[in-house]
Amino acid sequence: MPDQTRVFRGMKGNIFTRQLFHDVKVFFLVLAALCIVYLIFVPEHHNHRKAYEATLKGDLRDLRKAIEQFHEDIGIYPADLLDLTRQSANEVKAHIPKAKFNGPYLTIQGGIDNTGIPRNLFVKLRPFQQEDNDISHHWRYDPATGIVKSAVTDGVTLDGIKFSDL
């Protein structure tokens, strides 16, 4: 018993030992707090990313279906993506037979500047910019081939697919 008391008194009396013990306790408390924050926020970020990617893929699918339907009805691809939201053949940029036009091919509510063209959630906004209403910043569209892709080309999806290959 006297030996234990001496060790305790030695730790209590030595300033260096007390400070070191305190620093180690603080270090482990901070480490535990960081682990808790990591466990709370990282899976949620992963879930948001997964949801954004699912939305991007769904929007691309919808755009491609609308382009193909336009092409099947009229025989040419739309001149631009806004042609998919036109309500009459007179509004379409290209000269098309009015009888074959069955538009609009996309819902004309919401989206980029309320045109019906979906937003690409991976478009990075500049500082102090609320939204980006330039369709070419969201989607790359080739009217000669009817191919639409994400305008965001850098980076990969969670399943390893390049954004440029979607």
Image: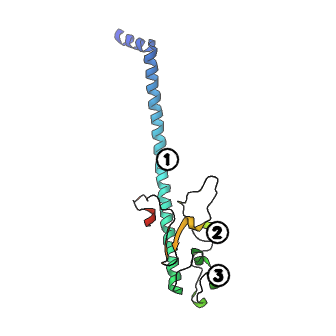
Q: Quadrant of the C terminus?
A: bottom left
Q: Residue furthest top?
A: 2
Q: Which residue is mark 1?
A: 41
Rounded to the nearest angstrom, the CA distance separating label 2 from label 3 is 17 Å
Query: Looking at the image, is mark 3 or mark 1 nearer the viewer?
Result: 3
Q: Quarter of the image containing the N terminus?
A: top left
Q: Earlier in the sequence, mark 2 or mark 1?
A: 1
Q: Earlier in the sequence, mark 2 or mark 3?
A: 3
Dot 2: within a 10 Å radius of its alpha carbon, few (fewer than 14), some, or many (20 or more) residues?
few
Visible residue check, residue 119:
no
Element marked by disc 3: helix
The residue at the point 58 percent across, 90 percent down is 97
- Residue 91's tag is 3
Give coordinates of residue 20: x percent, y percent: 44, 21
Q: According to the image, label 2 marks what residue?
A: 114
Q: Position of residue 76 (x, y in %)?
A: 52, 84
- Report whether residue 16 is seen: yes
Q: Identify the element where label 2 is drawn.
A: helix
Real-space CA distance between mark 3 and mark 1, rounded to the nearest whole angstrom: 48 Å
User: Tag 3: Cα neighbours inside 10 Å, few (<14), some, or many (≥20)?
Assistant: few
Question: What amino acid is labelled 3 in the image?
Answer: Glu
